[in-house]
Image: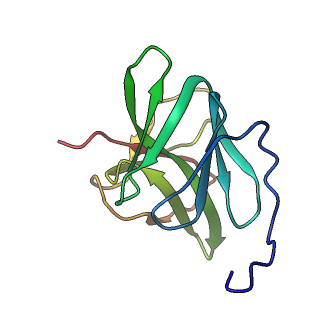
């Protein structure tokens, strides 16, 4: 924004702290209580931590963590939230893209959303994309795993 032109207004109430993620795609806001995580490109609220009681807020340079202080003097360290950014299907191949999380992921699928076991699709990965060849409809999820 070399010209200072307004791009978007994020409707965060009584916002006292704002921090961008390392890649600039997320905006975290805090207002002496909840922390909200927004997608910068659309202004969409992705998730909220309503009971955070946050005052100071920091994002790690690698973008994997954020930390905040609470009114009782404690500091909370958390992984950046993970969300599926895109799912496309072409000629029997499903392509998943996601952001956030710990940096270590397990992609899983099952054929029934309500029941059944989630099956691992391949080994743990550090990629933020995955391609799966699939001949029948599947439900997918990406697990953010703790670092060893």
- The residue closer to the viewer here, 54 or 85, is 54
Q: With respect to residue 29, does 22 lie above or below?
A: below
Task: Pinpoint residue 30: horizontal percent, then vertical percent.
Answer: 62, 38
- The residue closer to the viewer here, 45 or 59, is 59
Task: Pinpoint residue 44: horizontal percent, then vertical percent.
Answer: 76, 53
User: Which residue is the extreme one toward the top?
Assistant: 72
Residue 3 shown left or right of residue 82 in the figure: right
Task: Pinpoint residue 92: horizontal percent, then vertical percent.
Answer: 58, 70
Q: Residue at the spot x=63%, y=63% of the render?
A: 87
Q: Quadrant of residue 117?
A: top left
Q: Residue at the spot x=31%, y=60% of the render?
A: 126
- The residue closer to the viewer here, 102 or 22, is 22
Residue 97 shown left or right of residue 148 in the figure: right
Q: Quadrant of residue 25?
A: bottom right
The colour mode here is rainbow
Q: Residue at the spot x=39%, y=44% of the render?
A: 144
The answer to whether residue 49 shows anywhere in this view is no
The N terminus is located in which quarter?
Answer: bottom right
Task: Pinpoint residue 98: horizontal percent, then vertical percent.
Answer: 52, 59
Residue 115 shown left or right of residue 61 in the figure: right
The answer to whether residue 7 shows anywhere in this view is yes
Q: With respect to residue 130, does 90 lie above or below?
A: below
Q: Residue at the spot x=65%, y=35% of the render?
A: 48
User: Which residue is the extreme one toward the bottom?
Assistant: 2
- The residue closer to the viewer here, 60 or 56, is 56
Q: With respect to residue 137, does 2 lie above or below?
A: below
The C terminus is located in which quarter?
Answer: top left
Q: How many marks?
A: 0
């Amino acid at each position: 924004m070399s010209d200072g032109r307004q791009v978007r207004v994020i409707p965060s109430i009584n916002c006292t702290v704002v921090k961008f993620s390392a890649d600039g795609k997320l905006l975290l806001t805090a207002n002496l209580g909840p922390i909200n995580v927004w997608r910068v490109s659309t202004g969409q609220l992705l998730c909220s931590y309503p009971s955070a009681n946050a005052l100071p807020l920091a994002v790690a340079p690698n973008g994997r963590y954020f930390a905040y202080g609470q009114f009782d003097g404690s500091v909370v360290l958390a992984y950046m939230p993970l969300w599926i950014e895109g799912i496309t299907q072409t000629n029997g191949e499903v392509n998943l893209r996601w952001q956030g999380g710990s940096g270590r992921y397990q992609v899983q699928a099952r054929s029934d959303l309500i029941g059944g076991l989630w099956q691992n699709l391949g080994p743990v990965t550090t990629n933020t994309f995955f391609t799966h060849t699939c001949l029948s409809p599947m439900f997918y999820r990406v697990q953010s795993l703790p670092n060893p």
